[in-house]
Image: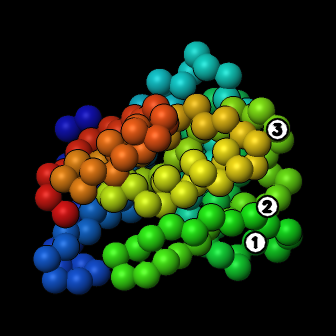
Amino acid sequence: MEHLKQLVRSIPDYPKPGIIFRDVTTLLRDADGFEQAIIALAEPFQSEKVDAVAGIEARGFILGGAVADRLGCGFIPIRKKGKLPWKTIGQEYTLEYGVDAIEIHEDAIRQGERILIIDDLIATGGTADAAAKLVRRSGGEVIGAAFIIDLPDLGGLKKLEASGVKCHALIAFEGH
């Protein structure tokens, strides 16, 4: 996984001073790195029944669609509030300075479906935790969540695991 870590661009002081933004677009651009990431994200769930992958906007769409294809299942977009054209259900979550919300179509998940959540990065875990709550409220079972990057100093992966979600991250970066 060290190869994948080297493909991630680190951008200091973005989106604000003191933050290092971990940009996976450089990894996605690299054909071998992208393929390795998709294989590694899907691998822990190969032997499980997965009905659909739920990808969190926006990079989770790219990764989630490819993982869904690899696992032979459907894909569900988890979008920011107001972006989906049909009837939705939403879940709010706390940001550093306020509240945001994500949504899925109300008919996206059938009762008892086994859902894998995918995103590029987990930091504080707010969005991923909201996604898990949204899946559960929709009648689905969260079988896991997978990320390319974990920022362990921010505790998101541990928070998600404490809520009963099996988590998988390919690489970790210390700090923010």
Name the residue: 49% across, 53% down.
129
Q: Quadrant of the N terminus?
A: top left
**Number of numbered discs:** 3
Mark 1 or mark 2, earlier in chain: 1
Q: Amino acid at mark 2?
A: His
* Mark 3: amino acid: Gln
Rendered position, 85 above or below 65: below
Residue 84, disc? 1
Q: Mark 3 or mark 1, which has the lower sequence index?
A: 1
Secondary structure beneath dot 3 equals loop
Amino acid type at image mark 1: Leu
Q: Position of residue 116 (x, y in %)?
A: 59, 38
Q: CA distance from mark 3 to mark 1?
A: 21 Å
Q: Secondary structure at mark 2?
A: strand
Q: Which residue is mark 2?
A: 105
Q: Position of residue 134 (x, y in %)?
A: 65, 54
Q: Position of residue 17 (x, y in %)?
A: 16, 83
Residue density around tag 2, few if under 14, some if 14–19, many if 20 or more, within 10 Å = some
Q: Secondary structure at mark 1?
A: loop
Mark 1 Cα shell of 10 Å, populated few (<14), some (14-19), many (≥20): some
